């Protein structure tokens, strides 16, 4: 681990938190490049791993610029934490917490508006007419009186030499051409046709492909190794030891894979994690019996529970989860003749990647150039604090004296068995109802391994031993619960953990929404109406629930074996409600329909928003039905998509997405669709069967035993 200090975003950061920041000066040259051929390239400072933020960010800039959509292109920005910083993260360039659109909203609007005014000024000077008489529309400048017209490209050079206006006029929403409309994605054609370059596609001259043999147990180290058989494999060029294992280098991936298979390694497991996941969970349950670190306290939960007329006590278990992105981790690194280091990778946090690589190779961060390319998924996996896979690539380059470019490749088995999982979590809740059916008290205990303790981010995001990511969705619940207390225990174990799509919300929403549903039934009240009473002071949050319930036909009767469940949750500044329809028959569960309502502020591109929610349903569904990472004697049992099976097309429900119109600043959409999937389905299963399942994945065998 390389010690660095980065101003990481505060928990719950949203677009509204930008209001307290000084507005960034317009930077049209940093974000917009207009070529003589009239193409307009929007420089994107965020990684796009399939969420289409390239299209969303280009939409913002192109609208203020008044470019024609057919002339718009995108290009990933170089690594420069000062120029391309994520405004929630301080001087750090990074993609995460669904902040791409939110932190860039005003930045790109101002850049586009400034560029537009500079083009007008250049045309005004050339044509010798007042700037106020020049119109800009669909990539053309026009002067009606004289009949003159010009493309952006004709005046781009002259405009670039003019002063940048400090306060360009931004469009009124009534003038928007693209924002809020369904414009086509800019990356679709290149991906369909196979032209888009992903990290796995990068080919440098004379490169060597490297695969690393890593210990089967987390924390084990190399005791000794024998590379003689590996070196006899045709195509194997070298075998070197690095801090995380033994790297086999070949002329291609197949050679390196065969060489690694032939390698003989003896591991020292004296300090390795040797417990099973069941043993670790058992320890979590014991830990939960003790008082933990207080995450939130309102009123007096103990007093409220003591006076309650009815109690609901519930336990929830959540397993480790792999990110399982379609493109396994990989990256290419090379030393240039001038001593600089060049990297080609799907870099999620270039600022961290630069610093870690620089530290390993003994250069300054400015000597590390990162070329960001498309990512075949991430879900948080490419945002490691250390960053593990690029650190390995740098270590291999160092061990081979930089003689050839190194393309580090992880197989699917490496990827799923290699750690950095969504943490395993245990929740215990005691909640009570008073005589009127209102919540009288709520006491929640959470046990999980902190993602941030022991990392450079601890100083910024851990307060009083509480990792914000462990308790988000609980500590900041919008529900009006007067007597509320939540505690957290930071588990100690050797399994590497990391943020997984929606981070703490991936488990906290299941707990909050299932317990609230259970309380509603205990009170004899409609679950949706029960929630409305808890959301009286949060109108935007209540509105998404109302919209989803109305569109789903909440309250309609369903035939036996079918059930309908509700859930609503806020994450990354965005409120999402889901109503799930399920069918339970002969112990099997089918999710038939998901109706979702979303309030993410101004909907920059409604089509992308809908796609992200649909994708979130597909992503989360497998974790509801079956996915888990299990350990036996510390060894991960899952290895590929046969044992860690993603959602299949045949399982995918019909998904309807409704977007709440808004004039508020945009908030996140990449992750907020995930949290409500599981509780909506879980509550629907209860409605269909009367059986209350809580833990994930759902115990479908229990349905057959009912």
Image (cartoon, rainbow, N blue to C red):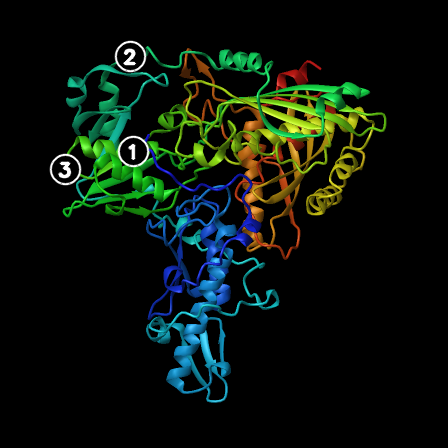
User: Distance of mark 1 from mark 2, alpha carbons?
Assistant: 22 Å
Label 1 sits on a secondary structure element that is: helix
Residue under the image location 30 percent in, 42 percent down = 354
Q: Are marks 1 and 3 in contact (CB under 8 Å)?
A: no
Q: Nearer the viewer, mark 1 or mark 3?
A: 1
User: Distance of mark 1 from mark 3, alpha carbons?
Assistant: 17 Å
Q: Is residue 255 left or right of residue 599?
A: left
Label 3 sits on a secondary structure element that is: loop
Residue 346 visible in the picture: no
Q: Which residue is mark 1?
A: 391
Q: Earlier in the sequence, mark 1 or mark 2?
A: 2
Looking at the picture, tell me which residue is in the foreground, 681 or 193. 681
* Quarter assignment of residue 164: bottom left
Q: Which residue is mark 2?
A: 268
User: Distance of mark 2 from mark 3, alpha carbons?
Assistant: 31 Å
| Quarter of the image with the N terminus in it | top left
Q: Looking at this rendering, what residue extends furthest in the bottom direction?
A: 146
Label 2 sits on a secondary structure element that is: strand
Residue under the image location 60 percent in, 49 percent down = 600
Looking at the picture, tell me which residue is in the foreground, 386 or 620. 386
* Quarter assignment of residue 208: top left
* Quarter assignment of residue 613: top right
Q: Pinpoint residue 288: horizontal percent, then vertical percent.
A: 58, 16
Q: Earlier in the sequence, mark 1 or mark 3?
A: 1
Number of numbered discs visible in the structure rendering = 3
Q: Pinpoint residue 40: horizontal percent, then vertical percent.
A: 40, 64
Q: Is residue 188 left or right of residue 685?
A: left
Q: Which residue is mark 3?
A: 403
Q: Is residue 457 left or right of residue 221?
A: right
Q: Earlier in the sequence, mark 2 or mark 3?
A: 2
Q: Nearer the viewer, mark 2 or mark 3?
A: 2
Residue 297 visible in the picture: yes
């Amino acid at each position: 681990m390389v010690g660095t200090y980065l101003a990481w975003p505060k928990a719950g950061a949203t677009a509204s938190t930008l209001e307290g920041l000084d507005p960034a000066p317009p930077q049209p040259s940093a974000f917009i490049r207009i070529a003589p051929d009239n193409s307009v390239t929007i420089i994107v400072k965020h990684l796009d791993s399939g969420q289409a933020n390239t299209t969303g960010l280009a939409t913002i800039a192109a609208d203020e610029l008044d470019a024609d959509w057919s002339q718009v292109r995108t290009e990933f920005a170089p690594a420069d934490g000062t120029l391309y910083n994520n405004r929630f993260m301080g001087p750090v360039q990074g993609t995460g917490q669904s902040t791409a659109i939110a932190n860039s909203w005003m930045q790109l609007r101002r850049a586009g508006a400034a560029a537009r005014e500079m083009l007008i000024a250049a045309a005004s000077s050339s044509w010798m007419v007042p700037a106020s008489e020049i119109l800009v529309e669909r990539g053309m400048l026009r002067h009606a009186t004289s009949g003159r017209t010009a493309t952006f490209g004709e005046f781009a050079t002259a405009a670039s030499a003019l002063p940048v206006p400090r306060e360009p006029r931004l469009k009124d929403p009534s003038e928007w051409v693209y924002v809020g409309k369904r414009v086509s994605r800019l990356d679709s054609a290149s991906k369909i046709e196979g032209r888009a370059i992903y990290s796995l596609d990068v080919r440098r001259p004379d490169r060597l492909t490297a695969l690393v043999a890593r210990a089967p147990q987390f924390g084990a180290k190399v005791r000794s190794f024998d590379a003689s058989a590996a070196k006899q494999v045709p195509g194997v060029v070298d075998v070197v030891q690095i801090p995380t294992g033994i790297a086999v280098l070949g002329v291609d991936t197949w050679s390196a894979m065969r060489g690694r298979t032939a390698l003989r390694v003896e591991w020292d497991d004296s300090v390795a994690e040797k417990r099973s996941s069941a043993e670790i969970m058992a320890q979590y349950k014991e830990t939960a019996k003790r008082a933990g670190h207080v995450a939130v306290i309102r009123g007096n939960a103990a007093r409220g529970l003591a006076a309650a007329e009815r109690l609901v006590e519930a336990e929830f278990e959540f397993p480790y989860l792999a990110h399982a992105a379609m493109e396994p981790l990989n990256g290419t690194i090379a030393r240039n003749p001038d001593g600089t280091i060049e990297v080609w990778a799907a870099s999620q946090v270039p600022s961290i990647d630069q610093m870690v690589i620089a530290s390993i190779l003994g250069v300054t961060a400015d000597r590390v150039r990162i070329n960001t390319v498309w990512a075949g998924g991430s879900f948080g996996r490419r945002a490691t604090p250390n960053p593990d896979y690029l650190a390995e690539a740098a270590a291999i380059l160092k061990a081979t004296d930089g003689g050839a470019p190194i393309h580090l490749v992880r197989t699917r088995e490496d990827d799923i068995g290699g750690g950095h999982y969504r943490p395993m979590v245990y929740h215990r809740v005691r909640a009570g109802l008073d005589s009127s059916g209102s919540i009288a008290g709520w006491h929640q205990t959470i046990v999980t391994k902190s993602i941030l303790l022991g990392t450079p981010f601890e100083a910024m995001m851990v307060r009083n031993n509480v990792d914000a990511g462990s308790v988000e969705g609980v500590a900041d619940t919008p529900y009006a619960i007067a007597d509320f207390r939540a505690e957290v225990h930071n588990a100690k174990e050797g399994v590497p953990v990391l943020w997984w799509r929606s981070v703490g919300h991936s488990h906290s929403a299941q707990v909050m929404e299932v317990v609230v549903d259970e309380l509603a039934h205990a009170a004899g009240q409609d679950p949706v109406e029960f929630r409305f009473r808890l959301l009286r002071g949060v109108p935007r949050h209540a509105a998404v629930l109302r919209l989803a319930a109305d569109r789903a036909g909440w309250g309609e009767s369903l035939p036996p074996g079918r059930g309908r469940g509700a859930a609503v949750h806020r994450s990354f500044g965005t409120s999402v409600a889901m109503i799930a329809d399920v069918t339970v028959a002969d112990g099997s569960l089918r999710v038939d329909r998901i109706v979702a309502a979303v309030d993410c502020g101004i909907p920059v591109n409604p089509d992308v928003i809908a796609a992200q929610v649909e994708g979130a349903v597909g992503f989360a569904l497998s974790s509801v039905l079956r996915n888990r990472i299990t350990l036996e004697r510390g060894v991960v049992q899952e290895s590929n998509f046969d044992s860690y099976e993603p959602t299949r097309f045949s399982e995918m429900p019909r998904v309807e997405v409704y977007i709440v119109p808004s004039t508020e600043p945009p908030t996140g959409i990449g992750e907020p669709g995930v949290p409500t999937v599981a509780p909506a389905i879980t509550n629907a299963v209860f409605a269909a069967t009367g059986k209350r399942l809580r833990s994930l994945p759902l115990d479908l065998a229990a349905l057959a035993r009912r």
